[in-house]
Image: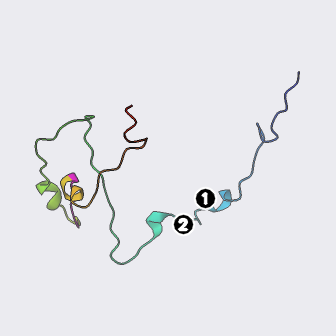
Amino acid sequence: MATATPRLMGAEVKRKEDPRLVTGTSSYVDDIAIPGLHYVAFVRSPHAHAKLGRLDTSAAAKRAGVFKIVTGQDIRAHCQPIPLGGRRGAGG
């Protein structure tokens, strides 16, 4: 029994966004300059489920251009725990 092959399988498909991407005429988020705009960098532990004894951010604070350092402890004051899904009181 022969199966139907999708028409796009193996076909060259010209995407309409390609010309602006390959010619450099497209805009990217990094191209946007708004007064007061800041970048963010996340630093994560390379150790899964590690417990941090202490976090020293003093070296980062001394770097030129650093606007603010926010730690998990800082965020905890503004967040609520995410409720778990499922039925409550179902005994399982």
Residue 21: assigned label: 1
SS state under label 2: loop
**Magenta stretch secondary structure, dominant:** loop
Q: Which residue is mark 2?
A: 27
Crowd class of label 1 (few under 14; some 14 to 19; many from 20; radius 10 Å): few
Using the image, tell me which numbered label, if any, was put on residue 51. none
Q: Which amino acid type corresponds to the residue marked 1 in the rendered image?
A: Leu
> Looking at the image, which residue is at 35% across and 48% down?
83
How would you rate the neighbour count of disc 2 (Cα within 10 Å): few for under 14, some for 14-19, many for 20 or more? Answer: few
**Who's the residue at 32% across and 76% down the image?**
36
- Tell me where residue 24 appears, x and y as whole percent: 58, 63
Q: Nearer the viewer, residue 48 or 56?
A: 48
Magenta span covers which residues?
67-72
69 with respect to 34 (left or right): left
Magenta-colored stretch includes residue 68? yes
User: Which secondary structure lies at badge 1?
Assistant: helix
The image shows residue 14 at horizontal and vertical percentages of 74, 52
Q: Is residue 32 above or below residue 78?
A: below
Q: Which image quadrant for residue 86?
A: top left
Q: How far is disc 1 from disc 2 in space, using C-alphas? A: 9 Å
> Residue 39's image quarter?
bottom left
Compared to residue 30, the image places residue 51 above or below, namely: above
Amino acid type, mark 2: Ser
Q: Is residue 50 magenta?
A: no
Q: Is residue 29 left or right of residue 69?
A: right
Residue 26 rendering spot, x and y as whole percentages: 58, 65
